[in-house]
Image: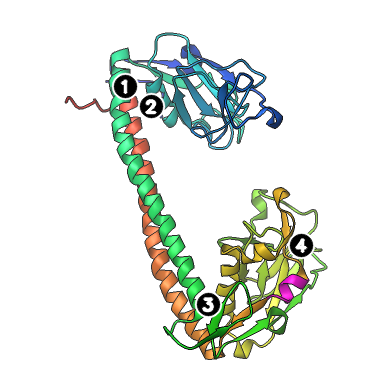
């Protein structure tokens, strides 16, 4: 082994060398494929698949403004998931967000696809969120004997395929747990947790039959919407996310920032708040913080807090998001992300309401069951992170020559 002279690469085999991506490859950005040129089928006008940032997915066919890329090419994401790469051995088109690398000399491109996977693409101060064809040329690359390139890529194909298979099965398992969690919530907040019992028609197409001792009421008889404008600066700014209502770190200068937060509305601990403007990715939660949130959001409060369990109603409303019930009540232009739940539709929405003791029983049951399922999901997600880390480490060890391919 010898020192490569590059810290992140470290030592390499004595007969390997260091070069640059620009020395080994021609780098070229994808073309501008306009939506009106897209086609669902391949024909003379649309002869090649177009690759977008999703890379492996052939979404449409088109003819871009750039010449078609030939086969035996590595394609790299220039925006979004910076540096993610794939290898294609037949001709294709690619949109402008992608960079194609075609070899200048005799190289085994599948080996360099793995090399791209471990290059730290922000190390040379590439523009944040974007990597250009000119920038990628300056990053370092290994030159290994062609036979070693071939044996390493073949070995990594086998190993990574096995890891990817485990990753996909684990991801599928996570999704099943998430579906189970939602099914448990839906069953509990609409049918209760006491097993079979006499039922009656709720009068709602959304909820069907409910236990006979429950009532069905419009939300306006349980909640009132409040809108108290702060009138001054200095309050904690709160964001409504699918991980809850959280304080916004204004120092990071991330997301949408307001010129003034004096026009934001007050939120008190225990208030409900929802993003009713986006019924697909929005959310509803109970605030654990005093602060202010966007005047476009909806803040509402239980009228009878002594005889209502707020967590039962929270589970009910979050279920209405995940089961797209609120979406079904909304209106607007969904294609532009303007699908809103108007105040009158919200206040007149009828939900099943158990007696107070039943509300508490359901909330306590769901707190316990959801915690158990969330623990399983967390363990699965930790395992996924470990697999991804192991895969990247495995690739790094072999493409830098620190490990040799086992002899069969």
In 3D space, how far apart are the residues under numbered discs 1 and 2 (Cα atoms)? 8 Å
Judge depth for marks 1 and 3 and give the one in front.
3
Q: Residue at x 37, y 36 (%)?
A: 392
| Earlier sequence position, callout 1 versus callout 3 | 1
Q: If you read the primary sequence from the N terminus, does the residue marked by circle 2 or circle 3 appear first?
A: 2
Separation (CA) of disc 3 from disc 4:
28 Å
The residue tagged 4 is 296
**Any magenta on residue 264?**
no
| Earlier sequence position, callout 3 versus callout 4 | 3
Say what secondary structure mark 4 lies in: loop
**Helix, strand or loop at mark 3:** helix
Name the residue beneath numbered marker 3: 189
The image shows residue 202 at horizontal and vertical percentages of 60, 81
**Spatial CA span between label 1 and label 4:** 57 Å
Magenta residues span 344-349
Q: Which disc number belongs to residue 12?
A: 1
Distance from the alpha carbon under mark 1 to that under mark 3: 61 Å
Residue 19 versus residue 33: which sits nearer the camera? 33
Q: CA distance from mark 4 to mark 2?
A: 50 Å
Assign the C terminus to one quadrant of the image: top left
Give the colour scheme of this rendering.
rainbow
Question: How many labels, in total?
Answer: 4
Decide: is 389 above or below 212.
above
Which residue was labeled with disc 2?
9
Q: Could you say where residue 270 lies in the image, as x and y percent from the top left?
A: 63, 77
Asked whether the residues under the numbered discs 1 and 2 touch, taking CB atoms below 8 Å apart as contact, a structural biologist would say yes
């Amino acid at each position: 082994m010898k020192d490569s002279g590059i810290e992140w690469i470290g030592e390499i085999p004595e007969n390997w060398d260091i070069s640059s991506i620009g020395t080994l490859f021609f780098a070229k950005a994808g073309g501008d494929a306009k939506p009106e040129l897209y086609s669902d089928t391949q024909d003379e006008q649309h002869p090649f698949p177009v690759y977008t940032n999703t890379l492996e997915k052939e979404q449409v066919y088109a003819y871009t403004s750039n010449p078609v890329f030939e086969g035996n090419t590595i394609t790299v994401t220039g925006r979004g998931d910076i540096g993610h790469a794939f290898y294609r051995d037949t001709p294709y088109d690619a949109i402008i967000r992608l960079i194609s690398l075609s070899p200048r000399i005799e190289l085994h491109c599948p080996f360099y696809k793995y090399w791209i996977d471990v290059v730290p693409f922000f190390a040379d101060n590439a523009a944040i969120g974007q990597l250009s064809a000119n920038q990628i040329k300056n990053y370092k690359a290994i030159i290994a004997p062609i036979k070693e390139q071939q044996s390493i890529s073949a070995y990594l194909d086998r190993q990574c395929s096995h890891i990817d298979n485990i990753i996909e099965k684990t991801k599928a398992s996570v999704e099943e747990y998430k579906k189970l969690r939602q099914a448990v919530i839906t069953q509990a907040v609409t049918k209760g947790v006491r097993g079979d019992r006499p039922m009656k028609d709720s009068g709602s197409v959304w909820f069907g039959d409910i236990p006979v001792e429950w009532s069905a009421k419009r939300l306006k008889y349980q909640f009132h919407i409040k809108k108290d404008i702060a009138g001054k600066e200095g309050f904690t700014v709160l964001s409504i996310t699918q991980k809850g209502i959280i304080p916004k770190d204004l120092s990071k200068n991330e997301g949408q920032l307001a010129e003034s937060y004096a026009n934001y509305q007050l939120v008190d601990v225990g208030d409900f708040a929802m993003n009713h403007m986006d019924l697909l990715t929005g959310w509803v939660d109970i605030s654990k913080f005093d602060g202010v949130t966007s005047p476009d959001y909806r803040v509402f409060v239980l009228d009878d807090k002594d005889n209502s369990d707020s967590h039962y109603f929270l589970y009910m409303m979050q279920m209405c998001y995940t089961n797209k019930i609120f979406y079904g009540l909304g209106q607007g232009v969904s294609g532009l992300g303007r699908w809103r739940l108007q105040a009158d539709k919200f206040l007149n929405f009828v939900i099943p309401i158990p007696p107070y003791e039943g509300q508490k029983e359901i909330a306590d049951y769901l707190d316990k069951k959801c915690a158990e399922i969330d623990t399983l999901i967390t363990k699965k997600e930790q395992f996924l992170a470990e697999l991804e880390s192991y895969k990247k480490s495995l690739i790094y060890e072999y493409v830098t020559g620190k490990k040799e391919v086992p002899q069969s």
